[in-house]
Image (spheres, rainbow, N blue to C red):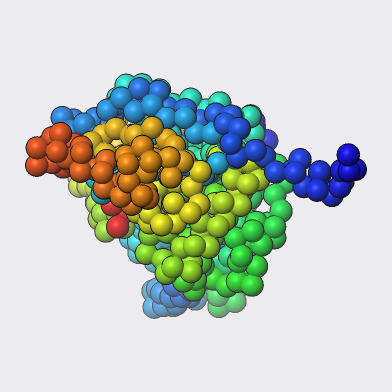
Amino acid sequence: MKPKNPATECANAAQPDRNAATTVLAGESIEKRYGSVEVLSDVSIEIPAAAVTALVGPNGTGKTTLLRLLLELEAPTSGAVTYEGPQTARRIGYLPQRPSFRPGFTVAETIEFYASLVETAVDSDRILDRVRLTDARNRPVEALSGGMTRLLGVGQSIVGSPPVVIFDEPASGLDPTMANRVFEVADELAAAGTAVVLTSHNLSLVSRHADRVGVLSDGTVTELTAPQTLATRYGVGDLREAYHAVVTADRADHGDGNDERHRGDPTDGERQ
Amino acid sequence: MTAHSALGQGTAIAAREVKTVLRTRIYALLAVGLFGFLFVLVAGGGGAATGYTPAIVDLLLPLEVIVPVLAIAIGYRSVVADLDRGELAVFTTYDVPAPVYVTAVYLGRSVGMLGMLGLPLVATGAVIAFTASPDTGVFATHSGVDSPVLFGRFVVLTALYGLSMLSLVLLGSVIARSLRTAIALAIGAVLVAVVGGDAAILAGVTDGWIGPSSLSWSFAAVPNSAYRSLVLETVIAIAAPTEGAYGSPAASAIGLVSWIIGPLLAAAAIVAHKRL
């Protein structure tokens, strides 16, 4: 038997097992209505640590609403959201769909401001390095490109090392390089043990980076599973085809798709 | 959330507000413009040459109008801009309690407000000190003597009035869902409180439903009337005693402080229940 390489052993020990699902956030039988409009119906979801969980689905199917419920920015009409992770200074980090920061402050000042809101010591330089903004640390936030602003938003979301981070459409409006970079950061966070939940319309990036994916359609979410498993389950070749299969099947089940659910998730596209 | 972390969060948010005010050039220009305006007022009215009290008389009415305008300029964006950028939703992930957030934003903006208002007033006081007749340098210990102490008291009362207006404007900023509605709400709230309040007192006295016994409390209930009463009773009446009373200083002080605390409490309650 060959002796173990201590360096390899150490590296392996530091890498959480992305297949060992320890649930850190759970939603059970969630229903959300806005007046007579039902947005989510009987959604149960478990978010595991050390994994990228992606929620995909057509516009207006309740992706942002579901994220807001997980963040407890809104209360479900029925059902419950439970945080099951460790007790930390900050439990959940959040990247809004269109992150924006107070003008007149530099990138470093912005991260330092958010760092001052948590009790634990925060290494701002490390965060900037993690989101590849070290070179832009002294740049005013209003001078950042859309992609860099998104990366700063990612940086803000990981201040205080929350066990869960929620990214709402992190790649929307970004060029392919920048979108890929944002997903790479999500991937790295998951590799370090963080539970990453994100919504996206970019199915190729989701396919490449997500450990588990669920399709939101008709107010419900399919079982969260690996992109390729989902494709296999629907007897198609990839996530894109599986997505279309789920959505088409749901629309067929509900006639022309003009039932109340499809008329709107009031929070999707908010603050455009 | 421990008391220590609430204090730390409040300090961080207040410091950010102060930096925002300091880094916004328009506020510096407003302060310079305000000093120029006050200087013209006291120089044009002859107050600068004759003493502090005449200068206060020259400044009182214009400041009743200028202070609310300044409060609107400095406060209408304070909360609604955070909401608009999605920062209020982000703050909830840091467990920032609504009262801590509202108080910190108010304190930070107050520092800016007091600087913008106080520095030009102090500079105006310095101009009076150099240009007025020699006996104005006396620190008054009895009635009938003009004094820089009276001017200092006037500055403090003006600051209190400014803080009450800022509190009202901040409440408007909390209620609003966009910058456009925020400025409309701020202007509306200030107009209702200031102009509406004075008009209501006038109508009440004219129609008889405000009698002499309740006039003091009526003045106290309206922020600018309370400010005016306090200045007349505790500043001008000291240097120039008269037979009549302008109102109860205690009631006016309570009224002005209530206009600071009341809107802040309402703002904190609204932020706690607002859809972010």
Place of residue A137 in the rendered image (x, y in percent of width and height, measured from the top left):
63, 68
Q: Can residue A158 be seen in the rendering of this structure?
A: yes
Please tell me whether residue B265 is drawn above or below residue A127 in the rendered image.
above
Q: How many marks?
A: 0
**B263 lies left or right of B137:** left
Q: Nearer the viewer, residue A175 or A119?
A: A175
Q: Nearer the viewer, residue B138 or B112?
A: B112
Q: Nearer the viewer, residue B240 or A216?
A: A216
Q: Quadrant of the N terminus of chain B?
A: top right
Q: Residue at x 16, y 40 (%)?
A: A251
**B27 lies left or right of A3:** left
Q: Residue at x 46, y 41 (%)?
A: A226
Which quadrant of the view contains residue B3? Answer: top right
Place of residue A149 in the rendered image (x, y in percent of width and height, measured from the top left):
49, 64
Place of residue B135 in the rendered image (x, y in percent of width and height, measured from the top left):
60, 68
Q: Residue at x 48, y 47 (%)?
A: A210
Q: Nearer the viewer, residue A235 or B120?
A: A235
Q: Can residue A166 be seen in the rendering of this structure?
A: no
Q: Quadrant of the C terminus of chain B?
A: top left
Which quadrant of the view contains residue B41? Answer: bottom left
Q: Residue at x 29, y 32 (%)?
A: A220
Place of residue A30 in the rendered image (x, y in percent of width and height, measured from the top left):
34, 26
**B181 lies left or right of B241:** left
Residue located farthest toward the front when viewing the structure as drawn:
A1
